[in-house]
Amino acid sequence: MSNFKDIYKNQINSMCSDDISLTAEDILKAYETSERKSSAAQPNTISAAQPNTASSTLAVKAENNPEISKPSGKPARVTMLHHIKTATSAASVAIAAAIVILVTGIVGVSAGAMGYGPLATLFKDKLDDEVSATLIEEGYLLEVGTTQSSNGFDVTFEGITGETYQPMLLFTIRVEDEEFCKQNESFYLTVYPGFSHEAYDKCLKEEAGEEVEAPRYMYSCEKAVQDPENPNLYYCSVVGASTHMINGDEFVVSVRSIRVGENIDNYSEEIFLDNKWELSLPAQNEGVLKEHWPEFYDSMADSERTVTSPNGVDFKLRYIIFSEYSMEVQFEYYFPENELSGGEENWDEVGMLFEKEFDLLLENAYFLVDGVEYKASDRYFTWCDSLGEIGPANQCYVVGLFPSIDSENAQHISIINGDQSIVIK
């Protein structure tokens, strides 16, 4: 376990930029808490292996909260996982009464036993998400199924599925205004997707214009799509904040607003809803999230884990997450020693050059799995540890996304880049 701790702390700290609120110590503590809770399981819980059709599996309590704080008009950063964007102030604001739903004692149960086929169908047919649909059919699901209404929008938090590194939250939104539905085939939902109470409170304080000690989390913003057969109904799935969700403690999911416009930055109207759910996952996420953890390769010799970009930047493989959704592949590089930096020691001045270089690498490199090639689908996020807080100063990290593969059953897995190769399996 100690080796895992050291590796995991380094990995998580590398992800904790100034926009991320937890350190490796926080997350490792959460991991250990989850282990302790799993060894002392609470009574009267239902596991995925022991389905129960009793309707009493959910204990739901609704409370009206008259205290409403209007978000300030100052710009706020929006993060969708690790993509940082800037939002402008809303042109139109409508504040609804805040409703708090406290969901306790929820446990994962067999999808087949509880009749969760409709949720799988929503992911598959309405959101084009075969992976989440399959996970639900395999039994990975926590059904919430509670609705909160305000300003003519009925928001139903349907449930949670996905993986430890990518929980998926599913919402349906029913709109009363027929004219709104005629004019908008889609809109954007801003959501605090499963934060600890402390992180959530920081977000609210920053919305209210208070000074908040960085680092902090901000909200996700995802598109809600209209049902072509029922134009008053919209569907939206949001990636959850797994750091806060997998430790067994209570977390907050809050739908903050609806944005109407071309994209999350260019919108003409924002309607604030302030819906809120408080819940926790079963010990070790049993029956809710499929477990996937990073596999590290930084103990390999540098020559065995390095691929070189067209302009001579050495990118060294650090870890791979073999997810059902995609492969997340992280590389590290040291920028000052490379000619591309031109002697510049401030990564902020030259970071874009290295990001473009990684993009060129992704155009050429590919995974070779039992003779089949898999090209990169996207560059995910990048950052640099300029102060050397988790490793050498100016060590930088970048992540590429590749299509998901069956790593367990594959016989041979390699990363190919011209005449270079990294043998994974």
Image (cartoon, rainbow, N blue to C red):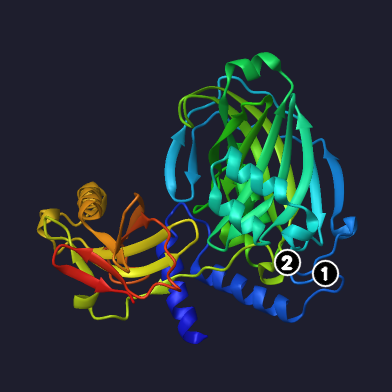
Please determine whether, in this image, residue 281 is positioned above or below residue 145.
below
Q: Position of residue 245 (x, y in %)?
A: 63, 60
In front of the other: 118 or 356? 118
Q: Secondary structure at mark 2?
A: loop
Q: Earlier in the sequence, mark 1 or mark 2?
A: 1
Residue 389 seen? no
Quadrant of the image occupied by residue 211: top right
Determine the image quadrant of residue 389.
bottom left
**Of all residues shown, which one is farthest toward the bottom?**
2
Residue sitting at 65 percent across and 45 percent down? 121
* x, y percent for residue 166: 54, 57
The C terminus - image quarter: bottom left
> Which residue is depicted at the point 79% across and 44% down?
146
Q: Amino acid at mark 2?
A: Pro
Residue at image mark 1: 45
Q: Residue at x 70, y 36 (%)?
A: 274
C-alpha span from label 1 to label 2: 8 Å
Q: In this figure, which residue is indicated by the disc labeled 2?
A: 282
Which is more toward the observer, 414 or 86?
414
Q: Circles 1 and 2: CB distance less than 8 Å?
A: yes
Q: Is residue 63 visible?
A: yes
**Amino acid carrying mark 1 in the image:** Thr
Q: Nearer the viewer, residue 147 or 341?
A: 147
